[in-house]
Amino acid sequence: MPAKASADSSPSRAAAGRNERRKARTRAALLDSARTLFARQGFENTAIVEITDTADLGVGSFYNHFDSKDDLLAALLKQVLSEQLTALDSRRVGVEDPAEAVAIAHRHWIRLTGEGPEWAWLVVRLDTSFELVVATQGDSASKDLERGIAEGRFDVARPELALHASGAALISSMRMILTGADIPDADSAHAEGVLRMFGVGAAEARDIARRPLPEVTPPAGGEVRA
């Protein structure tokens, strides 16, 4: 008599797996559609029905995954910021000095503002933008700061305030660039200011902030999008 099929290979489990994969594909299609439309015509000018039409889905599919357009935007920004954190990590491979690591991080985000102004605008306009940036890269930034303090590279009285101040400075610098401020070598100038905020001497901060910026190494199987 043949052995009974295991629970893992039962038709119901297989159907559940297909359903989860279908949901994941639908969510990804909505995010990709929104990403394209927001970049092309802006968040405010994009209707939910345009997002679903571009994704070749019904409006009901949208509400199966997101409560509102703002909810989708928050998910999209979290996705974009996570992708960029992966790209940033690739720039910092082999970098031992926490001061240089901090400079590379801030220069990365400032460079991206010029290369991908559409998503950068979304970041700086959102009320939750600062919280999203902190939630996405805060752990890495906090570790850089803590390591710099432990190694005597940074001198700050209140690390948590210094971390938030540097994040607020980043959002402010991004906004200035997006509104047309002409800042020569903006990425280096901003990074130099952050290092000075962390207690690095003027001459050394300037030197570190103006070193060649390491290239991004694309992840296996694709490119990082701005």
Image (tube, grey):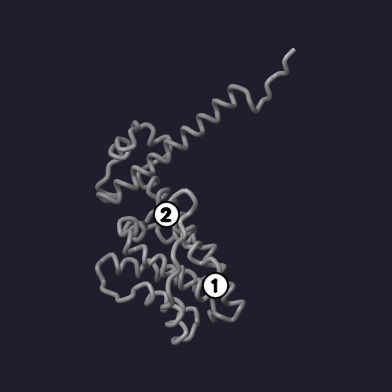
Contact between labelled residues 2 and 1, with CB atoms less than 8 Å apart = no
* Mark earlier in primary sequence (1, 2): 1
Q: Is residue 76 above or below residue 135?
A: above
Q: Quadrant of residue 167?
A: bottom left
Q: Quadrant of residue 58?
A: top left
Mark 2 highlights which residue?
Answer: 224
Spatial CA distance of label 1 from label 2 is 26 Å
Q: How many residues crowd around disc 2 within 10 Å: few (fewer than 14), some, or many (20 or more)?
A: few
Look at label 2 and name its amino acid: Val
Q: Is residue 6 above or below residue 200?
A: above
Look at label 1 and name its amino acid: Leu
State the residue in front, 154 or 67.
Answer: 154
Q: Position of residue 189 (x, y in %)?
A: 37, 77
Residue located at (40% from left, 49% from top): 76
Residue projecting furthest to the right: 1
| Mark carried by residue 25 | none
Q: How many residues crowd around disc 1 within 10 Å: few (fewer than 14), some, or many (20 or more)?
A: many
Residue located at (35% from left, 32% from top): 57
Residue located at (37% from left, 44% from top): 32
Mark 1 highlights which residue?
Answer: 145
Q: Is residue 45 above or below residue 192?
A: above
Q: Quadrant of the C terminus?
A: bottom left
Residue projecting furthest to the top: 1
Considering the numbered disc 2 on the image, is that residue within a helix, a strand or a loop? loop
Q: Position of residue 73 (x, y in %)?
A: 37, 49
Q: Is residue 179 above or below residue 18?
A: below
**Circle nearer the viewer, 1 or 2:** 2
Q: Would residue 64 appear left or right of 10 to someone viewing this image?
A: left
Q: Quadrant of residue 151?
A: bottom right
Considering the numbered disc 1 on the image, is that residue within a helix, a strand or a loop? helix
